[in-house]
Amino acid sequence: MEQNKINVCISCDDNYAKHAGVVVASILKNSGAEDVLAFFILDGGISDTNKVNIESLKALKNCEINFVPINNEIFKDYMNVKTHSYISIATDYRLKLGSLLPEVNKIIYLDCDVIVNDSLASLFNTDMEDYIIAGVSDIKGKKVKENPHYVNSGVLLIDLDKIRNEGIERDFWEFTINNLDFITSGAQGIINEVLKGRVKLLQKEWNVQSSNFTNRSSFTKNPKIIRFVAKRKPWHYASFSYHRDYYFKYLQCTPWKLSEEEYKYWTVDNQRDSIIAYIKYCPLFFLRPAFYKALFYSYLKPAFTTKNFL
């Protein structure tokens, strides 16, 4: 096994193939010189054209890209699990990673609504100790209050050897069958409940969950990974996504690159119309304490810190 090899898993259907490509591009553009990347794309029906487009990303940096065909029939028991209406069955593929990738011992799992801004080497080489997965605390305070190690499952480091050796996939299935009426957050809820006490917490920079200016899990200026947690993603016009420019930055490195006119539409025009849409959605935003917290951490605190070190 190559010392600097980093295994990365992304699951998607054809509708999200372009966004998976942007994830791959962001990883390749930010990889270290010694990083050797192996991608495993869990294929829920990706077209041949989009497979070729994703494969073409090797031009950014030589890497391994494997498409793993998925038979959705093996996930039939998860199809009635309650979750957000816009989430597809592809998000449940992570529940069977040990079986789907039998030769892989450890992997970073990423959802398609993620952007990577740093080398994944230090994340992949995290000492898992006796933990089975590692992740970042979820932005939902209620969930974390109930379980201090409740993590957002859009970014996970997973010890697949432990998953297989301890029969965790069977545990996921049994928990789901026995608690179908009580699961409300899909695969994320299943993972956190079954692995309670076996989850290692990572620094927040590894999964900055972001929707709008006030709603972010971390106000860091240097997010290593961004997860777009809102229903309306950066690729939805006039969404509230605060970090949307990162998405379009790496989109321009893919075969789905925008023309100059389109890029202006999705950045400059989109920014303006997003602000207008947010004001219409929340006209009294300036009365929310969260707005002033975001203002302080985004602009005032960095300015004060910089001034002190001049």
Image (cartoon, helix red, strand yellow):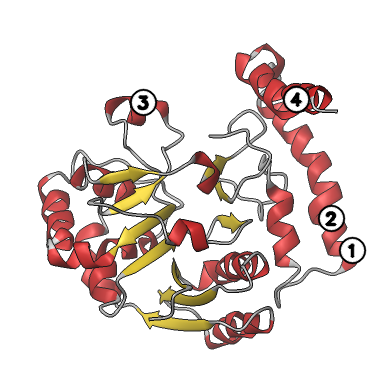
Q: CA distance from mark 4 to mark 1?
A: 38 Å
- Mark 1, secondary structure of its residue: helix
Q: Residue at x 33, y 59 (%)?
A: 158
Q: Going by the image, does 128 lie left or right of 214?
A: left
Mark 2 and mark 3: span between their CA atoms?
38 Å
Determine if residue 230 is in view. Answer: no
Q: Secondary structure at mark 3?
A: helix
- Which numbered disc, 4 or 1, marks the residue that appears first in the sequence? 1
State the SS at label 4.
Answer: helix
Residues marked 4 and 1 touching at CB (< 8 Å): no
Camera-side mark, 3 or 1: 3
Q: CA distance from mark 3 to mark 4?
A: 32 Å
For disc 2, the marked residue is 265
Q: In the image, is 70 to the left or to the right of 162?
A: right
Q: Quadrant of residue 141?
A: top left
Of badges 3 and 4, nearer the viewer stands 4
Q: Residue furthest top?
A: 287
Residue at 57% across / 34% down in the picture?
A: 218
Q: Residues within 10 Å of mark 2 (few under 14, many from 20)?
A: some
Tell me: 236 left or right of 270. Answer: left
Amino acid type at image mark 2: Tyr
Q: Are marks 2 and 1 in contact (CB under 8 Å)?
A: yes
Q: Which residue is mark 1?
A: 261
Q: Quadrant of residue 52?
A: bottom right
- Point out the frontmost of discs 2 and 4: 4
Q: Residue 260 is drawn in which quadrant? A: bottom right
Residue hosting label 3: 142
Residue 305's disc number: 4
- Between label 4 and label 1, give the one nearer the viewer: 4
Kindly identify the amino acid type of the residue bearing the numbered disc 1. Answer: Glu
